[in-house]
């Protein structure tokens, strides 16, 4: 389990209760069609000060050009999520580009869902590692 310190400690871990395999596959297929998405992770997140139970959170890393039109890129991602999930289910979506310090703990959770751009993922990991030194 990985996390960050402080009152609102964020605990990131592999899911105790992952998505149904068919739903997970459909979600990965939908996200693979998002042209602005470099990669996405689906770990379990717990904030003890704010939650009674952990929940799945979709962390997405967008390609740099997409950051100029963030709303458009996020609309494509959330539309894909909505198509993949059964009615009444939802996922929180977090743009990981704006919180790169979370990338290493998320990677340790072994929760990679889709990797559309391996080179961008390698760059993101290298930058996160360099900033953590």
Image (cartoon, rainbow, N blue to C red):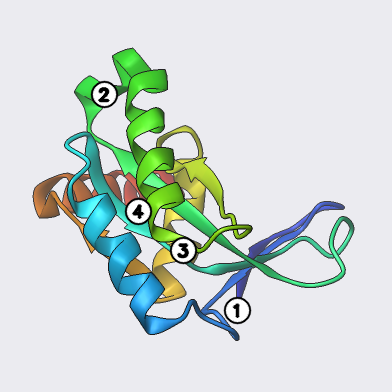
Q: Is residue 120 left or right of residue 44?
A: left
Q: Is residue 63 left or right of residue 13?
A: left
The kind of secondary structure element at disc 1 is loop
In this rendering, the label closer to the viewer, 4 or 3: 3
The numbered mark, 3 or 2, whose residue comes first in the sequence reads: 2
The numbered mark, 1 or 4, whose residue comes first in the sequence reads: 1
Q: Residue at x 56, y 58 (%)?
A: 87
The numbered mark, 4 or 3, whose residue comes first in the sequence reads: 3
Marks 3 and 1 sit apart, C-alpha to C-alpha, by 10 Å
Looking at the image, residue 24 lies above or below residue 28 = below
In front here: 131 or 94?
94
In this rendering, the label closer to the viewer, 3 or 2: 2
The numbered mark, 2 or 1, whose residue comes first in the sequence reads: 1
Q: Position of residue 64 (x, y in %)?
A: 23, 27
Tag 2 and tag 1, C-beta contact below 8 Å: no
The kind of secondary structure element at disc 3 is helix
Q: Position of residue 24 (x, y in %)?
A: 37, 72
Q: Which residue is mark 2?
A: 66
Marks 3 and 2 sit apart, C-alpha to C-alpha, by 22 Å
In front here: 111 or 81?
81
The numbered mark, 4 or 2, whose residue comes first in the sequence reads: 2
Looking at the image, residue 108 lies above or below residue 95 = below
Tag 1 and tag 4, C-beta contact below 8 Å: no
Q: Is residue 86 visible?
A: yes
Q: Quadrant of the N terminus?
A: bottom right
Looking at the image, residue 71 lies above or below residue 60 = above
Q: Which residue is mark 3?
A: 106
Q: Which residue is mark 1?
A: 1
Local packing at callout 3 (Cα closer than 10 Å; few below 14, some 14-19, many 20+) is many
Q: Position of residue 57 (x, y in %)?
A: 55, 58
Q: Position of residue 100 (x, y in %)?
A: 44, 43
Local packing at callout 4 (Cα closer than 10 Å; few below 14, some 14-19, many 20+) is some
């Amino acid at each position: 389990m990985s996390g960050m310190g402080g009152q609102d400690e964020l605990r990131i871990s592999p899911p105790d209760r992952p998505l149904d395999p068919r739903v997970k596959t459909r979600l990965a297929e939908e996200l693979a069609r998002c042209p602005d998405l470099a990669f996405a992770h689906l770990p379990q997140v717990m904030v003890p000060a704010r939650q009674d139970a952990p929940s799945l959170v979709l962390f997405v890393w967008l390609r740099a050009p997409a950051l100029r039109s963030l709303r458009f890129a996020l609309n494509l991602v959330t539309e894909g999520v909505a198509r993949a999930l059964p009615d009444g289910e939802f996922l929180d979506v977090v743009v990981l580009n704006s919180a790169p310090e979370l990338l290493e703990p998320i990677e340790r959770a072994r929760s990679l869902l889709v990797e559309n751009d391996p080179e961008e993922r390698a760059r993101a990991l290298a930058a996160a590692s360099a900033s953590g030194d």
